[in-house]
Amino acid sequence: MKNKTFISLKYALLIYLAVTVLLPIIVLFSRIRGSSIKEVFTSVQFLPMLKNSLITTVIATLISTVLSFGLAFALSRSNVKLKALWVILFSLPMLLPSISHGTGVVLLFGDNGIVTNLLGINIGVYGYTGIIIGSVLYSFPVSFLLFYDSFQYEDYTIYESASVLGFSKWRQFLKITLPSMKGTIVSAVIAVFTMVFTDYGVALICGGTEMTLPVYMYREVIGLMNFSSGAVVGVVLLMPAIIAFLLDLRKSNAGSNSTVTRGYMISKNKTRDALVYAAFAVTVFLLCLPIVAFAFQGFVKQYPMDKTFSWEHVKKLFSSGMGSYLMNSIAIALLTSLLGTVLSYFAAYITARMGKQIPNKVLHFISLLSLAIPGVVLGLSFVLTFNDTPLYSTIFILVIVNIVHFFSSPYLLAYNSLSKFNSNLEDVAATLGISKMKMLTAVYIPSTMLTIVEMYAYYFVNAMITISAVSFLVNFRTTTLSLMIPQLESQSFIEGTAIVSLMILAINLLVKGLTFLVKQYIIILEKRNRRTHEEGEKENIDVKQERI
């Protein structure tokens, strides 16, 4: 009976994901009218917008990938101290919405920016320059984490053999390091390209007269309520993401036969380490500049005329309803984290531990497919699909769209963790009469608590910073904190956007800090339980020996 209930839950989850992932995309395609296709593609704006999107995306992807690869390589191949802290510092931009990075660039380098006034140099930040700078800030932490993780699994024996054969360090880099990182480089390029190409936050703030496709779609839908034209652009934005997803899926399925027999041995080199420290310090300084700009701009009376400290802007924001928007964001993030973690973990358990039946393969594909749907496309798809349902204009549709938007990464975290268990566990459990639900609750969940905590934090942080997916679905009562940024920017209340960005960053830093503490507590408990188990086994052995 318990296994029948479990199977029913599996099919219920499959139906849920089909309704929230596949159905909205089908509806999006079905709502496109021929006249709208002609209107968009024959518009004098379309080709310039496409060119702007492609040029800024390609340049930002190139810079972001090279920068993140260099940082990850330097961190992995040097003896710098506190590596975990450097990883956190390089990941800071992930805790802010993309639109905040655009705001930070304007605060620093705009016509009246802090750096512009300080140095008297205007770099012309409105246009390609600003979009590229903001996009690099927004996207490079994702590729950095991919590269850094891959460098932890390099096998030193290959490098050792190359050194014996007389290969120089540069030749080893070209012949061993780059080929071994080929798959990760492809994944990083795909991830960054998709993020930048489909993001409208940075371009909305920094684009000036250079409009990109996501900004056009945002203005068509939000400003003009032109859903058909928005759907056409949404499909255009969806195509590169799906192609990239299929390429990455094909690459992932190719597999790898490499195994790590010995971790990379880092030689002592004080000069190298000093240079790495210097490069890291400069990078962190540049990453923190927008945050410093937010603090400076948000807490002075009126920049640049009156630079005295003031709480005036904070009070003004709270009097205009920021408190309720903050509560909305926290409530949505908490619900998204709780329900999203449960659903993605359960989906991963089914696909990783219940065989390769067709329903399980379909579930696996849908779970990964959400990774290929840009947030701006997903939001519009939800509008077209659910606008006449009781869910629409409620906080719950925002939770659902967030779960779908961020489903794939937590799902993969759980899937990879659950796949590491012995493949015969289910057969042993069936022989002993242990149900699948019992295995899930008594074996797998306790053994993967660290992964579950990380999944929860991932959902929360991303639900706090997201703008693209929810921007089409909110109303006055359900507006989130992150969506205040474009509202305030349109009112030229730049100090308000700075304060909102700081508040989002502070909440996400708090959550990341709590996540770290919880994970440390779990590790301590696991060590204590392991020690107790070992002591118990030792006592049993001693008792048996005494009897003998």
Image (spheres, rainbow, N blue to C red):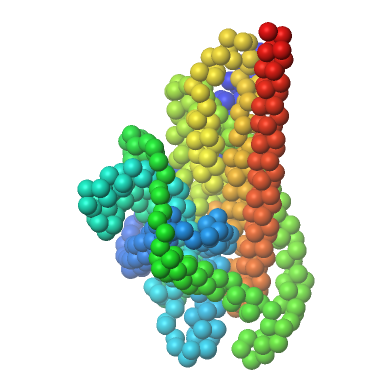
Name the residue at 56% across, 25% down: 11
Task: Estimate the x, y position of residue 164 in percent, counting from the top left.
Answer: 25, 48
Residue 55 shown left or right of residue 394 in the figure: left
**310 is higher (above) or lower (below) than 258:** below
Name the residue at 54% across, 74% down: 289
Which quadrant of the structure image shows residue 39? bottom left
Name the residue at 74% across, 82% down: 310
Total number of numbered discs in the rendering: 0
Residue 535 shown left or right of residue 211 in the figure: right
Task: Estimate the x, y position of residue 32 in percent, counting from the top left.
Answer: 42, 49
Task: Estimate the x, y position of residue 511 in percent, counting from the top left.
Answer: 67, 54
**174 is higher (above) or lower (below) than 537:** below
- Residue 79 appears in the picture as rendered: yes
- Residue 228 appears in the picture as rendered: no
Residue 53 shown left or right of residue 2 in the figure: left
| Between 273 and 86, the one nearer to me in the picture | 273
**388 is higher (above) or lower (below) than 80:** above
Task: Estimate the x, y position of residue 384 in percent, counting from the top left.
Answer: 53, 48
| Between 364 and 524, the one nearer to me in the picture | 524
Name the residue at 47% across, 67% down: 277
**223 is higher (above) or lower (below) than 257:** below
Q: Quadrant of the N terminus?
A: top right
Q: Quadrant of the C terminus?
A: top right
